[in-house]
Image: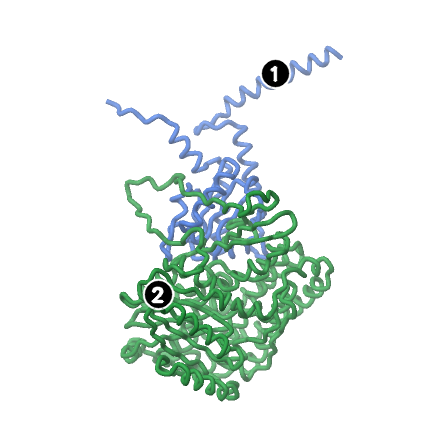
Chain colours: A blue, B green
Amino acid sequence: MSKSSKKSNSSSMEKNEDLSQLEGIAQVANGRSLFSKIKSWSRSQLLAPFTVGAGCCAREIMRLEGPNPQSHFIRERFNHERVEYCDILIVSGVINEKLSPYILRVYEKMMEPKYCVAVGTCSATGAIFDTMAIDELIPVDVYIPGCPPSMDALVGGIEILRSKVAKGESRAELLKLQANQPPEEASL
Amino acid sequence: MNNINGLNTQSNQSNLLRDALYRRFGTEFKSSHIDRGAIEWRSTLFYPWKDNLKDEFESFFNELKIDFNFHMLVDISLEKKGHEKILHYGLINLENYFRLLVSVKINDGPFIPGLKHLWKSAEGLEKELEERHGLRVSNGSPSQQRSLLKKIKKEKSEKREGIRKLPEYQLPITPNQHDLQKKWYQAGPISQPLKGRARLDFLADTEKVYDCQIETGFCHRGFEKMMLNKPISEVSFFMERLCTRDSVFAPLIWNEALEQRLQVSVTEKAQAIRMVWMEMARIEGHLSYLQELTGELGFLIESSALTELIEQVYHLYNLHSGKNQNFSIFTVGGMKKDLPMGWATECLEVVKYIYKELESIQSKVIRNKSWMILTAANPMSATSALEFGLTGPNLRACGVNYDLRKRRPRYYYSDVDFQVPLGIDGTTYDRFLVRVEEIKQSIKIINQVLDHLPAGKVNDPDIDMEELFKKASDTEPLTYNMIESTEGELGILMRTKGKGLSHFHIRSPSYVHLHCFSNLVKGDSVANALSAFLSLGIDAWEMDR
């Protein structure tokens, strides 16, 4: 028994060493390990979106769950009730001064890494009503244009988001990294 | 253009009322401008504001309410003419369906007198004046935060991305500090059943709601003010995006108002197609309402079945206009496109399918015992509904027979056979059931109209808008136009000036309905409160404008 346990221990140790070596080997250009790659890929397979905003675009987003030919590509639910379990913020419609603190509060509560999608021109640029754009508040990963965007555009946008999540390219993380880096010294 | 056959019996009574008003107030009521051949009588009372005239002002409105039976205050809007400020009060006498628009000129006084003690609907409407225009109302209840759109200067050098710090809202303090059981709870504006419509602060303990404060303005876009700077040709584009429930009634009412102003007639076929579109929008709006309410109360199978029916209506929209919302299909004088071949038969089939499915959904829901228990709460009496100025299905659920399609029929509504479904108690159950029955009546109307679709053109290509505006530019009258939209009376009060607008105000049913909410939920549980909120059918964008 003792021998076998020793053996198994030693083998697990060896495995760990192997894995750490593998990890070192599998490092890619942007400095991510294999494990983080697997993690982000599995995260991309079932997104957890939280939708904010009312408007024509919100109505289109709700249609993604309905009986459409396009909604076969979507397996997510869009009416999550808890923000704490979500990592994707889908913003649609007009954002004004009064609503913006609440959006920030929702964004702060979300899981990390955080992603944000701006649906429709209203939330992306302020558009015809000349209101606030969402990227003045929080960093945005995917913009889906249209007033309101068509179903195909929405599905396409979510596919782009899925590929971004799989790669782990979060805009918010990138900005955080940039902020933490010391300023580059001017080369003489 | 308009059928006014149904109004002849009422017009004698309204003449009597008009004479009585003239005898009492005499010269102050200047003109009796009759509009659309209906019994709307417009009056102008210019009232210079001084502090000591406050009692006179209040007694005037008191007399209108008690002696002349104007039981409903529908709307208040503020017009600015240079340095002058004019308040327009819209009143309705339901007995002989008489509308009165009282215009009051106000000087720069410390505040304007509130009418909260006469009409309960004045509370919400005056709050809007405070919130949007910065007026101060005596005995008013000011909002926590004014909804103003400050323009943020975007400098190119400034880094746009990144989190910016903004002021946070704090809950109001509990009035009685020693009462530890009562607490203020906050719901919304982002959380699931509210979805950006409003923030509700409940003063509640574990059983009851004692007080409720409503805060609006989370989707405020400055819609009315923005329209003043736009040329008239662009307004229709914006009106499509006024309401998120359906984009039919708002652009339609705008085009009707322009037709009324420029005296353009609509072709017969276009009138019939407009009727079909209005009823389709009503079906769609009610279906999405039913879907939301059933989904929120846990009837998920029925809810998903209803989404399928909404898709069917979208399919009909798509076939005619090429879009499922924000379709620019209405123009001055008719419709932009004729119906495609075979659309009428497709529509009849779809409508038949909807009717069949709706019956089966209805039979599963309304006799269900848990549904009956969940929706039996929050009753509203007919008198309080009138005091709060409710219109549409919410008023009819309380048992008041008031439908603009019957009272002021336009197009072919007087020739079509349909009924106005009424509720009894005004509970959530009634509000649900009235809407279900209304969908069936709408289907009945669509069937009748499509069976007798008139031939001819759908618009008049010879309409020259510029010439019409030149003709109409001599006078600048106030134009009021209203429609029985999905959730009640949607109205426009406007004054054109050249090719632009000098005054523009939208009477939105949702805003008025919201302010009866705090009365509706007092003494009931918080869980019922949220379903009651959904049962009022409030649309965020239409409410906040």
Q: Which residue is mark 2?
A: B51
Q: Which residue is mark 1?
A: A14
Query: In the image, what residue type sits under mark 2?
Result: Asp
Q: Quadrant of the N terminus of chain A?
A: top right
Residue B251 higher or lower than B175, as above or below? below
Closer to the camera in the image, B230 or A96: A96
In the image, taking residue B308 as reference, residue B88 lies left or right, namely: left
The residue at the point 74 percent across, 11 percent down is A2
**Residue B280 in the image: x percent, y percent?**
54, 70
Tell me where residue B372 sits by quadrant.
bottom right
Q: Quadrant of the C terminus of chain A?
A: top left
The residue at the point 55 percent across, 62 percent down is B537
**Residue B397 in the image: x percent, y percent?**
61, 69
Can residue B322 be seen at all in this image of the molecule? no
Q: CA distance from mark 1 to mark 2?
A: 92 Å
The answer as to whether the residues below labels 1 and 2 share one chain is: no
Total numbered labels placed on residues in the image: 2
Please give the label number shown on residue B239: none
Closer to the camera in the image, B183 or B42: B183
Closer to the camera in the image, A97 or A54: A97
**Residue B481 in the image: x percent, y percent?**
43, 74
Query: In the image, what residue type sits under mark 1?
Result: Glu
The residue at the point 40 percent across, 58 percent down is B130
In the image, taking residue B120 as reference, residue B138 lies left or right, namely: left
Label 1 residue SS: helix
Q: Residues within 10 Å of mark 1 (few under 14, many from 20)?
A: few
**Residue B513 in the image: x percent, y percent?**
52, 63
Instruction: Single out the mark in the foreground, 1 or 2.
Output: 2
